Image (cartoon, helix red, strand yellow):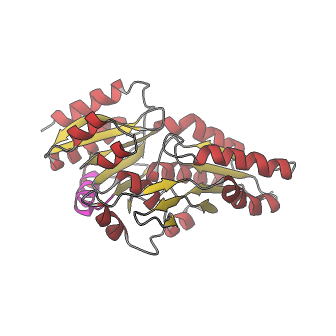
Amino acid sequence: MKPFALVTDSGCALTADLRSRFGIDGFVRGNVTFPDGHTEKADLDWEKRTPEEFFSSLTGKKFILKTSCPNIDEIAALFLPFVEEGREVLMVTVSHALSGTYNFAVKAAEKVMSEHPGSKIRVVDSLRYSTAQGLLLVRASALREQGKSCDEAADWIEQNKNCFHQMGIMDDLFFLARTGRVNKAAAFMGSLVGVEPMADFSPNGLSTVLAKGKGKKKSLDAVVSYFEKLAIDPKGQIVFLAHSLREKEANYLKKTLEERVGPKEIILTSVDMFCGANIGPGLVALFFYGQPITDDLSKEKEILAECLQKK
């Protein structure tokens, strides 16, 4: 029996080289609508414009974008070739709290399976976005290489997705507030000069600000300390470091992480277009596997506070 197909959506931030390396068999694109009214498919591989051009266009907050998820038929079309080959399919989607992709994917899977009796499609809501979603796909790919079945890989992701963290800094919460991803009070605090909002994932699939650092270097150093305290097997894991138009800060974080911890691999990449339209420029974040996230994030808040107090 052929190994199961591993598919996703354009919120995963995995460019063509990374999809090839980790055996991602396919993905479906969301949509980005530009201020002039025209809509494009979200570009994971930056074929029309570079990340720098894209995020630079959002600087100044006048160039506002809208995103929408792929429809049921588009997702069904992603599944169909693999089902016709007799392969089982595992799809890992961007968080349902950020997009309707998961709900549409479930309906698409039901449609395809009803038309092809005996087929199997598992759809998993990552409760994550961008390279955190990518990390879940990397783990699923490793499980497949170990000979795990579609169900075994899907069950592992369901049971462990709450162990995938983010930590970093954000220059401005304007774009997140505009789409309802943070409240206006948090957005105002995040706009103050010298204040760096720092967030981790909450169990409901959204990012939650845990603290407001003061000064980029001190805040980025605290990111590494946070990783040291919460990561499981920090030296043995692949981590992602994503940014939106903050290459200098990302390189500083990468170098500090290498010197202080030395993970197996640090993959430095840009935030993808689909998620980036709702994030805007100014993000630098580390994504990693660690201890389960607490329901109220109290443990994570306490740890980050300690990390920020370090000199």
Can you see residue 175?
Answer: yes
Asked if residue 252 lies in the magenta stretch, the reply is yes
Instruction: Determine the residue positioned at 68% across, 52% down.
Output: 72
In-front residue for pair 38/42: 38
Can you see residue 225?
Answer: no
In-front residue for pair 208/159: 208
Magenta range? 244-257
Where is residue 103 drawn, in percent x and y?
63, 43
The answer to which quarter of the image holds residue 243 is bottom left
Q: Is residue 10 above or below residue 52?
A: above
Instruction: Determine the residue positioned at 82% across, 58% down.
Output: 86
The answer to which quarter of the image holds residue 269 is bottom left
Q: Is residue 132 left or right of residue 177?
A: right
Instruction: Determine the residue positioned at 42% across, 42% down.
Output: 233
Where is residue 292 drawn, in percent x and y?
45, 31
Where is residue 290 drawn, in percent x and y?
42, 38
Q: Main secondary structure of the magenta part?
A: helix
Task: Assign the C terminus to one quadrant of the image.
Answer: top left
Q: Is residue 67 left or right of residue 305?
A: right
